[in-house]
Image (cartoon, grey):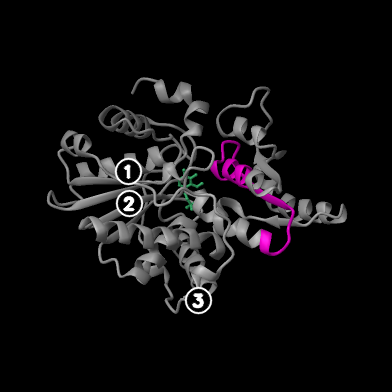
Amino acid sequence: MHIDKLPRFPLAQLPTPIEKLPRLSRELDGPDLLIKRDDQTGLALGGNKTRKLEFLVGDALAQGCDTLITAGAAQSNHCRQTAAAAAKAGLKCEVILNGKKPDVPNGNLLLNRLFGANEHWIDRPQRPAKLRELPEQLRAQGRKPYVIGVGGSNGVGATGYVVAMIELMEQLRVSGQRVDHILFGTSSGGTQAGIELGARITGYTGKLHGLSIDKNDPEHLEYETEVAQIANECAEYIGSVVRLTKDDIHVVYGYKGEGYGIVGGLEREAIRLMARCEGIILDPVYAGRAFGALVDLIRKGAFKRDETVLFWHTGGAPALFAYAADVVKAG
Ligand SMILES: Cc1ncc(COP(=O)(O)O)c(C=O)c1O
């Protein structure tokens, strides 16, 4: 393995802390709960994309690129973090966003503006064409764009989560803690790919559970294949001989609710529980939904009382403010 020799642009405050959640464990009458605070990665209000972007921006700089291009939902955390990373690295940033430009930007959108990203508003189906055309247009103007796919989920980006898994295992070794289950939200697959590969590389023996944010089984059985492909692309990039198949990837479905970004009772309860028991902020789209899934699994008896369960907080807090009305609604 040659992770240390790969191009990497420092963006994150590492290691992120691991905390105990004793009041939440008691409230849920459940297993011991730990949280890994990747909402505290440090760049522009934090989140999982900081880790991926260290390697993606490193690669962009190594290739002599001058512009980052990426795409996402209007409240994309990935776009916000990419815009911030570009600012820090002295690169230009173009973000392709779904929907209509609002009069007053809020949440992640407001932050994109502050970081000086150039916005391109499209209807979602136009995304693939826009991701092809925009780099061509910029090249014709003499710029050198680096395209980061949605969520930064490729072999280069996933490297950030191999490093994260190595970091977590080292923290557990030093503190003498054992973790039986690790749960995290999964959507474009890069985070899970890196964690799954990192788990193999480090010899983690507990279980990993990717909590699907935006897919329902059996609608997306190919997702496991996609995650394994990203992991294998990553293995090649970092020089590891490990290879994964779809059968190695565990994804939990059934928590999509009314759809991506639509806040329901599951997310509202999860956000309140975490806030009131532990003073920690979750967003309604990713970490709130993922933690809601974890609460449901605890209530269904998925974990033994003497087990330790780690929730990997992947960030997303800025989106909370854009969903204020949905979050404070009753029920
Ligand atoms: C806060 C947050 N958590 C989790 C995820 C899911 O990560 P991935 O896309 O790598 O599966 C995202 C992706 O956008 C996110 O913004």
SS at mark 3? Answer: loop
| Residue at the extreme left of the image, as rendered | 306
Give the residue pinned by disc 3: 239
The reply, left or right, for residue 92 in relation to residue 80 is: right
Question: Amino acid under label 1?
Answer: Ala
Please tell me whether mark 2 or mark 1 is closer to you in this view.
2
Report if residue 77 lies within the magenta region: yes
Comparing 280 with 151, the one in front is: 280
Q: Is-magenta flag for residue 256? A: no
Q: Is residue 9 above or below residue 36?
A: below
Report the side of 89 relative to 276 (left or right).
right
> Which of disc 3 and disc 2 is earlier in sequence?
2
Say whether marks 2 and 3 touch (CB < 8 Å).
no
Provide residue 28's location: percent of width, then percent of height.
19, 37
Q: Does residue 135 appear to the left or right of 207 in the view shown? A: right
Separation of disc 2 and disc 1 at Cα? 9 Å
Please tell me whether mark 2 sits on a helix, a strand or a loop.
strand
Comparing marks 1 and 3, which lies closer to the viewer?
3
Q: Secondary structure at mark 1?
A: helix
Count up the numbered dots: 3
Please give the name of the residue rendered at 45% of the width and 25% of the height, measured from the top-left corner.
Answer: 326
Crowding at dot 1, Cα within 10 Å, few <14 / some 14-19 / many 20+, comes out as many
Magenta segment range?
Answer: 61-85
The residue closer to the viewer here, 214 or 113, is 113
Check residue 104 in the rendering and tell me which mark sits there, or answer none. none
Question: Which amino acid, by three-letter code, is at mark 3?
Answer: Gly
- Packing grade of label 3 (10 A; few <14, some 14-19, many >=20) is few
Instruction: Give the residue pinned by disc 2.
Output: 183
Q: Are marks 2 and 1 in contact (CB under 8 Å)?
A: yes
